[in-house]
Image: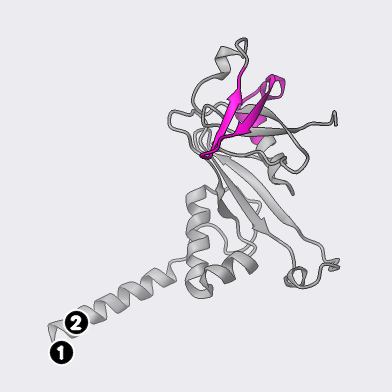
Amino acid sequence: MTATDVLTGQLDLLTLLELESRPTAPLHFTVGHYHTDELDEAYAYRAKSEGILGVSNWSRQWNEWRTGRNVAAGSPHRTFTYGADLRCHEHWRNPNCQCLGGLLCRVYCHDCDWWSGIHDSENRAVEDMLSHCWPGWQELPLVTATMKANGGYKYKIPEDYPADWQYPGAPVRTLREPMGSRHVPGRSPWGGYDIGVINNTK
């Protein structure tokens, strides 16, 4: 037996041990309290065998939505959005499918080590988090924003806007048209959530 054979055997054994050590979080849907690192590990573990498309569509596991990160530098509440797809396989092909199950969301605050409740709407999960991390956000004055020609948004912040809500990670409430209601992470002037409030006056 050569040194190469011994080394190859050791590497095979290490690979086998790695595959046999299962993650802490379950490899299916759960309502248990797990850290995001544990959920990410479980998701990656299952993706090794099923591929990223297979695990994201059918595993029912919580997985991070990269479009839901809110991690402004200096923010006291860096948050991450997780989703779990409990819909059946048929709903992709049949719009009349009546099976139970939906697309669920929850938001994790890294700095509080706190999870929002589980919601069937990303906006509601975000609002749950805001009420925990940013109490009083509902009373913020409404502002308007326009899209810049080179991308991004320009906010019209009044001079009497509360000074204690102008620091890293703070949210802002903007008046929006009906098709633009999503609460967008990282888009406020301070790098926090831009909370969409629908204009009902039209």
The answer to whether residue 152 is left or right of residue 86 is left
Where residue 189 sits, quadrant-wise, is: top right
Q: Foreground: 177 or 118? A: 177
Looking at the image, the residue that sits furthest to the top is 160
Q: Is residue 127 left or right of residue 97?
A: left
Displayed quadrant of residue 162: top right
**Residue holding disc 1:** 1
- Mark pair 2, 1: CA separation: 7 Å
Q: Position of residue 3 (x, y in %)?
A: 13, 82
Q: Is residue 65 above or below residue 197?
A: below
Q: At 56% across and 14% down in the image, what residue appears?
A: 164
Give neighbour class at mark 2: few <14, some 14-19, many 20+ (Cα, 10 Å).
few
Magenta includes 146? yes
Q: Which residues are magenta?
A: 128-157
Helix or strand or loop: what does disc 2 sit on?
A: helix
The local secondary structure at tag 1 comes to loop
Identify the residue position indicated by label 2 in the image. 6
Q: Quadrant of the C terminus?
A: top right
